[in-house]
């Protein structure tokens, strides 16, 4: 029974780390889109003057992005909690470094 339990634990860790990596990549893309949208120039009316308000479709997009970000954070927390319960915090750290930190370092080189 013990080898089966170890195999199950190993498969679970691989699954959690893989899912964590996917979520971190998705979170990075959501944050990049938000950054680019926040820096975009305001929309203009036919007369060339800015609206002064937010277009309803843009507001819906912003709300959807906010909900997606909250859901991603929740799922990332679940993955991290699962890895912590299995005593695999080092695997979580290495996945975070590989997916979240290394791309930043590579972009600066």
Image (cartoon, grey):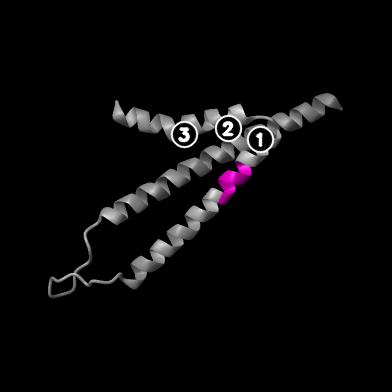
Quick one: label 1, few (<14), some, or many (20+) residues within 10 Å?
Answer: some
Magenta stretch: helix, strand or loop mostly: helix
Distance Cα–Cα, label 1 vs label 2:
8 Å
Q: Secondary structure at mark 1?
A: helix
User: Which label number is shown at residue 18?
Assistant: none
Q: Residue at x 49, y 59 (%)?
A: 67
User: Which label number is shown at residue 92?
Assistant: 2
Query: Where residue 49 sits in the image (x, y, percent)?
Result: 15, 71
Question: Could you tell me how many numbered marks the image carries?
Answer: 3
Q: Secondary structure at mark 2?
A: helix
Q: Residue at x 54, y 30 (%)?
A: 93
Q: Residue at x 64, y 37 (%)?
A: 15
Q: Quadrant of residue 62?
A: bottom left
Tag 3 residue? 99
Query: Where residue 107 sits in the image (x, y, percent)?
Result: 32, 31
Is residue 78 located in the magenta-colored stretch of the structure?
A: yes
The quadrant in which the N terminus is found is top right
Distance Cα–Cα, label 3 vs label 1:
19 Å
> Can you tell which of label 3 and label 1 is closer to the viewer?
1
Please state the extent of the stretch shown in magenta in the rendering. Answer: 74-79
Q: Earlier in the sequence, mark 1 or mark 2?
A: 1
> Can you tell which of label 2 and label 3 is closer to the viewer?
2
Tag 1 residue? 84
Distance Cα–Cα, label 2 vs label 3:
11 Å
Q: Earlier in the sequence, mark 2 or mark 3?
A: 2
Horizontal relation, residue 22 to residue 51: left or right? right
Is residue 30 located in the magenta-colored stretch of the structure?
A: no
The quadrant in which the C terminus is found is top left
Q: Quadrant of residue 89?
A: top right
Q: Tags 1 and 2 in contact by the CB under 8 Å rule? A: yes
Q: Earlier in the sequence, mark 3 or mark 1?
A: 1
Horizontal relation, residue 26 to residue 85: left or right? left
């Amino acid at each position: 029974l013990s080898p089966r339990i170890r195999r199950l634990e190993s498969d679970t860790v691989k699954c959690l780390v893989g899912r964590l990596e996917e979520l971190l990549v998705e979170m990075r893309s959501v944050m990049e889109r938000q950054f680019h949208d926040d820096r975009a120039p305001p929309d203009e009316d036919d007369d060339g003057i800015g609206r002064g308000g937010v277009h309803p479709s843009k507001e819906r997009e912003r709300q959807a992005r906010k909900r997606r970000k909250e859901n991603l954070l929740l799922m990332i927390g679940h993955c991290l909690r699962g890895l912590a319960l299995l005593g695999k915090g080092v695997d979580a750290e290495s996945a975070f470094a590989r997916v979240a930190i290394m791309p930043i370092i590579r972009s600066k080189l």
